[in-house]
């Protein structure tokens, strides 16, 4: 478990380091500020589209060949992606990097499947919370370092990100063990590996279908930040790359604390489903408060209830893994990632358009925080769906042969 957490930390840190500067680099290459929101939303959507197409394939490949080789190849590809973006002379070159990044970042499916391999079902919420904490740790150090480097050069964070991905590759190459025994592997099938074939798994039980809907709404709301946060912070509060990086690092620190320290005890006391609903509800409250905050300090205060949003993702994952066998964990994570990717395609385009309509000399939407209020409504809908689907008792555990206990 320690090996996969360190690998996840380095992997996410390499992605977080470019967040404070990517919109500025897009603006520099585009030569215009008028359509920066739409361009940024388009690039995020391209990344998500590759996730949708490739996550089920990578998840199924890890069910067939094991988690370790899939994770290592993906990390190497991510290092190449950052090198391409560091050298990008045009928006089209940057677009190629985003496409490659979307493909290689699909290795998260294997990371979550790895955790399912090495933890018993009743401890998976805590295990996924630890992965979430590792991800958040990467976003603590990544954006903070990216903000500092961005003050020096817009290209510097991409070079450092490539180096971090290379370090993660070498670490995994020499340290990371395989988690899926050959006897537990499943034959590869393009029917299972296609995005729509993987999504059929989510329709195999009403419980999975409803949780997939909650998962979609959670991801849809979360992509608000990748689409408009940097632009919003600059336009409303006058924050530069350094301040944006510091705030994102604070977000990551709070999320790391919630997922690493609170998920286990709260789930033990309240159960997976109630914990999920509580996390989504506090996330909705926090996003609404962010959109209404008139100054930067109140925005930071609003991040406190929003941090409890981190209770939702590990518990959704835990509930879903209980409904499939051990040999289908990669396919399940691929299907989950495809659901998140569909949200990732739609959400940045939606919130990018909403933000563009809320700024400028004659905005269509008169309030600049409209995107945050809409995202709060999305999470509130997710909490309601999670609560209504929770009328039934939590599903039984499945062992590796698919038998319940």
Image (tube, helix red, strand yellow):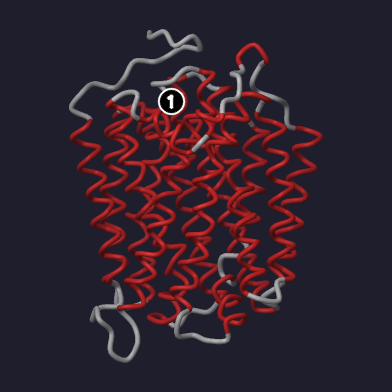
Query: Residue 308 location in percent, x, y?
Result: 36, 48
Q: How many marks?
A: 1
Q: Secondary structure at mark 1?
A: helix
In this rendering, position of residue 88 left or right of residue 309: right
User: In terms of depth relative to the viewer, which is nearer, 195 or 252?
Assistant: 195
Task: Determine crowd level at label 1: few under 14, some 14-19, many 20+ residues with C-alpha closer than 10 A.
Answer: many
What is the residue that sits farthest to the front in this orientation? 191
In this rendering, position of residue 207 left or right of residue 323: left
Query: Residue 253 location in percent, x, y?
Result: 51, 54
In this rendering, position of residue 405 left or right of residue 80: left
In the rendered view, would you say 96 is above or below 380?
Answer: below
Query: Residue 374 location in percent, x, y?
Result: 26, 62
In this rendering, position of residue 72 left or right of residue 263: right
Position of the C terminus, as image quadrant, is top left
In the rendered view, would you say 16 is above or below 268?
Answer: below
User: In terms of depth relative to the viewer, which is nearer, 111 or 241?
Assistant: 111
Q: Quadrant of residue 354?
A: bottom left
Please give the name of the residue rendered at 31% of the width and 60% of the height, measured from the top-left corner.
287
Please give the name of the residue rendered at 45% of the width and 53% of the height, measured from the top-left corner.
254
Please give the name of the residue rendered at 60% of the width and 19% of the height, measured from the top-left corner.
187
Q: Quadrant of residue 111?
A: top right
Please give the name of the residue rendered at 45% of the width and 32% of the height, measured from the top-left corner.
197
Q: Which residue is mark 1?
A: 321
């Amino acid at each position: 478990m320690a090996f996969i957490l360190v690998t996840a930390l380095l992997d996410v840190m390499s992605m977080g380091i470019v967040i404070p500067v990517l919109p500025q680099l897009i603006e520099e290459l585009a030569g215009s500020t008028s359509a920066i929101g739409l361009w940024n939303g388009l690039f995020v959507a391209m990344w998500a589209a590759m996730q949708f197409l490739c996550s089920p394939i990578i998840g199924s490949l890890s069910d067939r060949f094991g988690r370790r080789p899939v994770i290592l190849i993906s990390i190497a590809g991510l290092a190449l992606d950052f090198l391409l973006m560091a050298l990008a002379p045009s928006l089209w070159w940057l677009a190629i990097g985003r496409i490659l990044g979307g493909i290689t970042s699909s290795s998260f499916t294997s990371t979550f499947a790895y955790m399912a391999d090495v933890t018993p079902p009743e401890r998976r919420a805590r295990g996924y919370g630890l992965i979430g904490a590792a991800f958040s740790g990467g976003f603590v150090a990544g954006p903070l370092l990216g903000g500092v480097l961005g003050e020096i050069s817009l290209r510097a964070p991409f070079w450092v990100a490539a180096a971090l991905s290379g370090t993660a590759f070498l670490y995994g190459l020499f340290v990371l063990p395989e988690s899926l025994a050959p006897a537990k592997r499943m034959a590869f099938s393009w029917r299972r590996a296609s995005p729509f074939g993987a999504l059929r798994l989510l329709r195999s039980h009403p419980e999975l279908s409803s949780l997939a809907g909650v998962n979609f709404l959670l991801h849809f709301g979360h992509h608000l930040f990748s689409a408009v946060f940097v632009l919003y912070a600059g336009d409303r509060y006058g924050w530069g790359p350094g301040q944006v990086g510091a705030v994102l690092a604070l977000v990551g620190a709070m999320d790391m604390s919630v997922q690493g320290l609170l998920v286990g005890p709260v789930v033990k006391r309240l159960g997976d489903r109630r914990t999920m609903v509580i996390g989504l509800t506090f996330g909705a409250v926090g996003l609404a408060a962010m959109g209404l905050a008139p100054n930067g300090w109140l925005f930071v205060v609003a991040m406190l209830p929003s941090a409890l949003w981190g209770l939702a993702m590990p518990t959704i994952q835990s509930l879903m893994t209980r409904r499939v066998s051990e040999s289908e964990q990669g396919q399940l994570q691929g299907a989950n990632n495809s659901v998140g990717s569909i949200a990732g395609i739609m959400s940045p385009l939606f919130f990018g358009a909403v933000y563009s309509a809320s700024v400028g000399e004659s905005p269509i939407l008169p309030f600049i925080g409209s995107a945050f209020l809409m995202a709060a409504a999305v999470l509130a809908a997710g909490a309601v769906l999670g609560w209504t689907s929770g009328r039934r008792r939590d599903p039984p555990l499945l062992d590796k042969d698919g038998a319940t206990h």
